Amino acid sequence: MEEVKLLGAFPSPFTHRVIWALKLKGVKYDYVEENIFNKSHLLLQSNPVHQKVPVLIHGGKPLAESIVILEYIEETWPQNPLFPHDPYERAVARFWLRFGEDKLPAFWAFFGTVGEEQEKATKEAKELLRILEEHGLGDRKFFGGNEIGLTDLAFGWIACWLEVLGEVAGVKLLEADGFPRLQRWIEDFKEVPVIKETLPDRKGMLAYFRYRRSTFIGEAASYEAAS
């Protein structure tokens, strides 16, 4: 069997998408934790375009971008399928994968802003969550039905990262009495054994994202002062 290696970083939800997929497929792999502030030669060589994690190296061939990697994993290891068998349902899953990637900057904008700009970004993020809950998830247990799939993995950051980002930024996106179907999905998602066993350390996440937010806000302030 060809060697499978994953270059990742613990705070990265994109890394965890790939970890979850590999584990759900039962694929053995070697994990290399990258320091994103001091990137290794292997990472820069394997992903010279974006120079970011995750990177999956299979048989010496590197692949970057988590959604691309997820689809590659699904096609390469067909056991325990994570895409629906039905062509229409598979296309719907791809639609929501695309939606999530296209809207990710808007989902996350509240984290790197303050004041009125943050209020506007928070309002937009909540509207996107409403769209996702009503039209993407609906009344299903998971996005594709009763079994976890690629779409769930792609939106796993909502279940595992959003609360941390909100705490750091002083924003509450998922109120206790709001988004009941997404709240239920979060509970179900976190109860999947593979997810439960691989959730990142919350204290470490808080420390990392506090640093990242202070950096974003500081850079924005410096830019405004120089303008």
Image: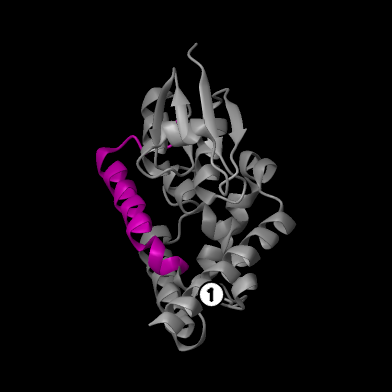
Residue 199 position, x and y percent, is 66, 47
Q: Residue furthest front?
A: 226
Looking at the image, residue 93 lies above or below residue 112: above
- Colour basis: one colour
Question: Is 123 on the left-hand or right-hand side of 164?
Answer: left
- The C terminus lies in which quarter of the figure? bottom left
Q: Is 209 above or below relative to 24?
A: below
Q: Nearer the viewer, residue 42 or 76?
A: 42
Q: Secondary structure at mark 1?
A: helix
Question: What is the x, y in percent for residue 47?
Answer: 40, 36
Up-down: is 201 above or below 135?
above
Q: Position of residue 70 (x, y in %)?
A: 42, 37
Query: Was residue 191 drawn as part of the magenta stretch in this picture?
Result: no
78 or 147: nearer the viewer: 78
Which residue carries the number 1 mark?
217
Please tell me which residue is depicted at 41% across the width and 61% down the height of the picture.
138
Q: Position of residue 187 (x, y in %)?
A: 62, 57
- Measuring 36% from the left and 39% from the top, which residue is drawn there? 68
Left/right placement of residue 215 relative to residue 208 reads left
Residue 92 in the figure: left or right of residue 4: left
Prevailing secondary structure class for the magenta stretch in the rendered image = helix
> In the orientation shown, which residue stands out farthest toward the right?
203
Asked whether residue 84 is drawn in magenta, I would say yes
Bounds of the magenta segment: 81-108
